[in-house]
Image (cartoon, rainbow, N blue to C red):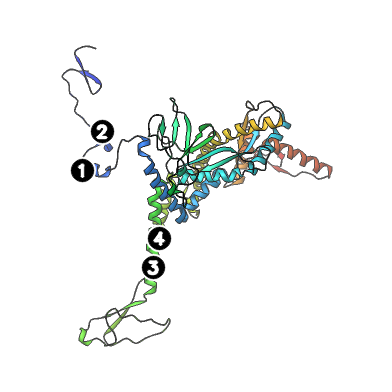
Amino acid sequence: MSDAYTKRNGIYSPSGMTYPAKASFDSAQSGPQMAKRFAYADNRSPNQENNSATRAQIRSRARYETQNSTYARGITLTIANDTIGTGPRLQLLSKNSNFNKQVEADFLSWTKAIDLAEKLRAIRIGRLVDGESIGEMVTNPGVNSEVQLDLALYEADYLVAPDFDQNSNTHYDGIDYDEYGNPTKYWLLDEHPDDIGFASLMPKPKAHNASAIIHYFRVDRAGQRRGISEMQSSLELFNMLRTYTKSTLDAAETAANHAGLLFTQAPPEQQADDVAAFYEENMTRNMMKALPFGWDFRQLKAEQPTTSYPAFKNEIINEIARCLNVPFNVAALNSSEYNYASGRLDHQAYFRSISVEQANIETTILNRLYEVWSMEYALLRGLDSMQFVRHNWHWDGFENIDPKKSAEAREIDLINNATTYAQVYADKGLDWEEQFEQRAIEKKKMESLGLVENTTKSTTGDKEDA
């Protein structure tokens, strides 16, 4: 590099030239107003920002709101139910259809034996409220299935750092890592740290092999190792919504309980002896009553709730729903202001969010469960390894807002080879091979009974099988 250039702040520039610091971004401006607006902004690492004390505080508040706010409770249940539904279903893709059906049936039986769908819904709620859910693959002799694999669930409170180790590159808040950043051990308590009698014993966590642990949380920043409540940015809004509702009700009750006030302009010596300041008297409904001389009655106006009360609540609910990727009508369970177009548009983003989360669950939870299950299943049945047998997962489909228009669109796509029957049935959470086989059985039965199958005119004018 020539001497004519000097290095300043890591950048080479011609010697003698200066570049005054200028911020072209409004958010980078300095000054008292901006300092006040961003007083709590910092550059802490994701793990320092989400330290154990911060997570515990947010976790307790999120649980409190979920337990006391009908909207918080309803939204978390809706997201969990829409994401998991009745549970995922396995589809094997080997060339042996009979083998596929048998394995799929046995796997479905096992998922029912351990109530996998219910556990997955609890895991999804745990990540929403607590920020993370932890499961351990264990052998449970009580499982009523040939394969006795089970999934034991832990709340985030169970995962704590052992006393002898501090946070470092190889350990963070209850998790040990190798030199490549892969988890090797999880330190879990045997009981919840706040259980009665257990907290006073100063419990020590035990090391669990990471190969058996499923740690389910959302990674928002590179290097993040523990999860934080997905509701954290909306907790104040949930609380505001409950507080405003209670305040409005209190004001309305005050107006309703106090029918009116007595006023007089007379001096104290001319006031009636039986009417003192702050005197109270119950009034019989629908009755006229004479007042003392010089007194006037004014009915207290019920000014709550105001005309803006519903609009304010809706705006708060809408803001809450945004950070959770839920449309307003799902969060509020109110579609009175929606039409077909707006409802469909909002739900497209919601369904996309659900699909992304289902794919995440497949990678983080289901594939690992199936890997262990298939190994035990193969050993019990004397089969070769099933490791290289491809598989898919099917989830419950969503009811369309306008079934007729959707059916017409699917028919056009099939005619133009823009989609497949496998995809059409997968969107409904169904296996296309099973549906085709069932359809063939039904047609054969109808023919044997002499029934004529109905036909309907397609959108293109051709007649197709119904």
Q: Which residue is mark 4?
A: 245
Local packing at callout 2 (Cα closer than 10 Å; few below 14, some 14-19, many 20+) is few
Q: Quadrant of the C terminus?
A: top right
Local packing at callout 3 (Cα closer than 10 Å; few below 14, some 14-19, many 20+) is some
- Can residue 396 be seen by looking at this rendering? no
Local packing at callout 4 (Cα closer than 10 Å; few below 14, some 14-19, many 20+) is some
Q: Quadrant of the N terminus?
A: top left
Up/down of 55 relative to 419, above or below: below
Question: Which element type, helix, strand or loop, lies under badge 3?
Answer: helix
Cα–Cα span, label 3 and label 1: 42 Å
Label 4 vs label 2, nearer the camera? 4
Question: Which element type, helix, strand or loop, lies under badge 4?
Answer: helix
Q: Would residue 287 be found to the left or right of residue 19 on screen?
A: right
Q: Residue flagged by tag 4: what amino acid is it?
A: Thr
Number of marks drawn: 4
Cα–Cα span, label 1 and label 2: 18 Å
Q: Residue flagged by tag 3: what amino acid is it?
A: Ala
Q: Residue flagged by tag 1: what amino acid is it?
A: Pro
**Considering only order in the chain, which callout, 2 or 4, is on the residue closer to the N terminus?**
2
Cα–Cα span, label 1 and label 4: 35 Å
Q: Which residue is mark 3?
A: 252
Give how far across and how far down residue 78 sits, in percent.
52, 49
Which label belongs to residue 135? none
Q: Would residue 15 be found to the left or right of residue 187 on screen?
A: left
Which label belongs to residue 32? 1
Q: Are marks 3 and 4 in contact (CB under 8 Å)?
A: no
